[in-house]
Amino acid sequence: MTKTALITGITGQDGSYLAELLLDQGYRVVGMLRRLSLENYGRIEHLGNRIELAQADLLDQVSLSNILREYEPDEVYNLAAMSFVPTSWNQPVLTGEFTALGVTRVLDAVRSVDRSIRLYQASSSEMFGKVRETPQNEDTPFYPRSPYGVAKVYGHYITVNYRESYDMYAVSGILFNHESPRRGLEFFPRKVSDGVARIALGLADHIALGNLEARRDWGFAGDYVRAMWLMLQRDEPTDYVIGMGETHSCQELVELAFARVGLDPERHIRIDPRLFRPADVDLLVSDPSKAKAELGWEPAVSFKQLICMMVDADMERLQTSIRRGDLQPVH
């Protein structure tokens, strides 16, 4: 029988890649959308009528229960959140409503409607924050350093609590940074790939960036959604750390991106102190050995391949806009 999957946050980077994966696996895919005056379907337009879209909201318990009753999913992937870390300092209460209490509402909707539904919760490496040990695995204590990280810790533990209290199949994937050409422009790797492409094409002359000494464990989002799916195929529910197991500095990412187009980054980078975080995380680097051993998960795209992929995609996108006359080089 065909399985049905409900994806919250389907219009985001991860949601679009996950929808593709599930369709390839033969699923019926339902995407949950918030009611907004401005529609943002760019990442899923290519899927056309292969997916179904339905309205509900993480802030509204009744709508979550109703969507479960109407579509009767076998699996729920809760990817929706207020997910941009810097914004969480400006909107800490709203971040908590979506990223913490929103998880509780999804879990309780599953509990009250159908406990046989398998649920995936998107946890984050930002929960480790001021790290207690390096590398970080499933047993590493959390010490979040942003309102976003704090909210994700709540979402993580409420998922554990419902799993243990109500015998639900609810798991969390503690995903380290994962990027792609579909990432929002506000995120550092995409800001860099887009900025480099604009400079190479004469649309800009510099990029303003913050702390280039910060280090992250970056991988490709398309690889990471496969891990999400694998987690819900196990006989017993348990949580997994997903990452590359290696760390790179923002400086290294910048140099790779500029090298892709044959430019010197020192001529085009401006450091803006306003872009530094009030409190940054320490050395985040994953230990994904449990996922590799139990799920058989392996990333297919390397860090260098990822950055080159992103720069190439932004070059192609901007060149198309120039050909159409939508953009004009400034020099």
Image: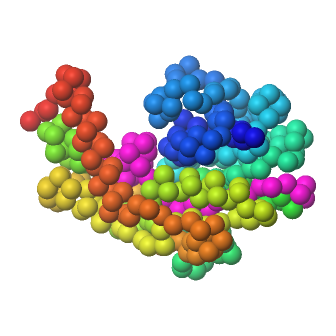
User: Which range of residues does the magenta coloring cover?
Assistant: 165-194
- Residue located at (48% from left, 52% from top): 222
Q: Quadrant of residue 55 in the image?
A: top right
Q: Quadrant of residue 216 in the image?
A: bottom left
Locate the C terminus and report the quarter of the image it occupies: top left
The colour style of the image is rainbow
Q: Quadrant of residue 34 in the image?
A: top right
Residue 167 is situated, as x and y percent measured from the top left of the image, at 89, 57
Residue 21 is situated, as x and y percent measured from the top left of the image, at 55, 46
Q: How many marks?
A: 0
Whether residue 150 appears in this view of the structure is no
Q: Is residue 190 left or right of residue 140?
A: left
Whether residue 324 appears in this view of the structure is yes
- Residue located at (51% from left, 31% from top): 47
- Residue located at (18% from left, 26% from top): 323
Say which of 65 and 300 sits in front.
Answer: 300
Residue 142 is situated, as x and y percent measured from the top left of the image, at 65, 69
Is 168 in the magenta?
A: yes
Locate the N terminus and report the quarter of the image it occupies: top right
Residue at the farthest front position: 1
Q: Is residue 34 left or right of residue 190?
A: right
Residue 44 versus residue 98 in the image, above or below: above
- Residue located at (60% from left, 52% from top): 148
Residue 97 is situated, as x and y percent measured from the top left of the image, at 70, 42
Say which of 268 and 323 sits in front.
Answer: 323
Q: Is residue 42 left or right of residue 211?
A: right
Residue 298 versus residue 206 in the image, above or below: below
Say which of 278 and 299 sits in front.
Answer: 299
Is 58 in the magenta?
A: no
Say which of 114 and 84 sits in front.
Answer: 114
